[in-house]
Image (cartoon, helix red, strand yellow):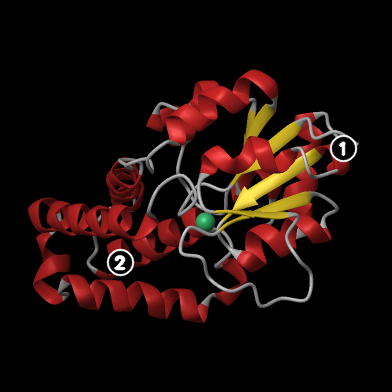
Amino acid sequence: MMIKCITFDLDDTLWACAPVLKVAEEKCYAWFKRYYPKITAKYSEQQLFENRQQYMHTHPEQVFNLTQIRLDWLAQIADEFSYPPQMAQDAFHIFWLARNQVTLFEGVLESLEQLSANFSLGVISNGNADVDHIGIGKYFDFSVNVIDAGFAKPSPEIFHHALTLANYCAQETVHIGDNPECDVLGALNAGLHAIWYNPKQDIWLEDKKPSAIIQKLNEIETKINFIG
Ligand SMILES: [Mg+2]
């Protein structure tokens, strides 16, 4: 069956995630310092980070939804200092704005432009980035996150949710991402094809093999000809 649809992971596939998250945390901390200074008087940025890690550790059932768990943790912080609950929403918005200030990897725009002419493109992400807000939404026909699907990668449910929006079957769809478990094994187990985006040329360690491996997104179209 021919590939008709390509779904993309976002973080560390279209941009580097760590630097953007670092800046987002810094901006949040500066915002607390300015508007909710009791928080920063008690916690350093590192301590606040550890506080959130601790919260996530004690709520493992919620960790798949990174947006909700951050909101819940922020609500707990607001409560600790008797700040209004609205603080949580506002702080999340500060984080979210900064978190979407991404720098696309070289060649991403050109690849999306080219691929969108020949394939239906979609997004399947566990994170809370927003392709419309980032300005690349026009290349994608649909976008699925954890909140939409109620499941996170590698659960097959999130891939199947995407397929209902894609109007293509699993065998006509290839998912592309950097994470061997979430992206490659997740997609393969859901019946899709899977391309491993592996710019650092790591070794593949799993029994199940990706349909193809690429170091740059501009290799996608050539590789797709050999899939399906
Ligand atoms: Mg990723």
Q: Quadrant of the N terminus?
A: top right
How many C-alpha atoms fall within 10 Å of the one at disc 2: few (<14), some, or many (≥20)? Answer: some
Residue type, label 1: Cys
How many C-alpha atoms fall within 10 Å of the one at disc 1: few (<14), some, or many (≥20)? Answer: some
In the displayed structure, 174 sits above or below 34; it is: above
Front residue of 12 and 93: 12
Quadrant assignment, res 63? bottom right
Whether the residue under disc 2 has CB within 8 Å of ligand 1? no
Front residue of 78 and 109: 109
Give the residue drawn at x 29%, y 72%.
49
CA–CA distance between discs 2 and 1?
A: 44 Å
Front residue of 208 and 159: 208
Q: Position of residue 211 (x, y in %)?
A: 75, 55
Q: Position of residue 128 (x, y in %)?
A: 47, 47
Give the residue drawn at x 28%, y 70%.
80
- Determine which of the numbered discs, if any, sits on residue 169 in the image: 1
Residue type, label 2: Ile
Q: Quadrant of the C terminus?
A: top right
Q: Along the polypeptide, which appears first: circle 2 or circle 1?
A: 2
Farthest residue, direction right: 1
100 left or right of 224 in image? left
In the displayed structure, 130 sits above or below 49; it is: above
65 left or right of 72 in image? right
Q: Nearer the viewer, mark 2 or mark 1?
A: 1
- Determine which of the numbered discs, if any, sits on residue 77 in the image: 2
**Contact, CB < 8 Å: mark 2 with mark 1?**
no
Quadrant assignment, res 164? top right
Whether residue 152 appears in this view of the structure is no
Whether residue 102 appears in this view of the structure is yes
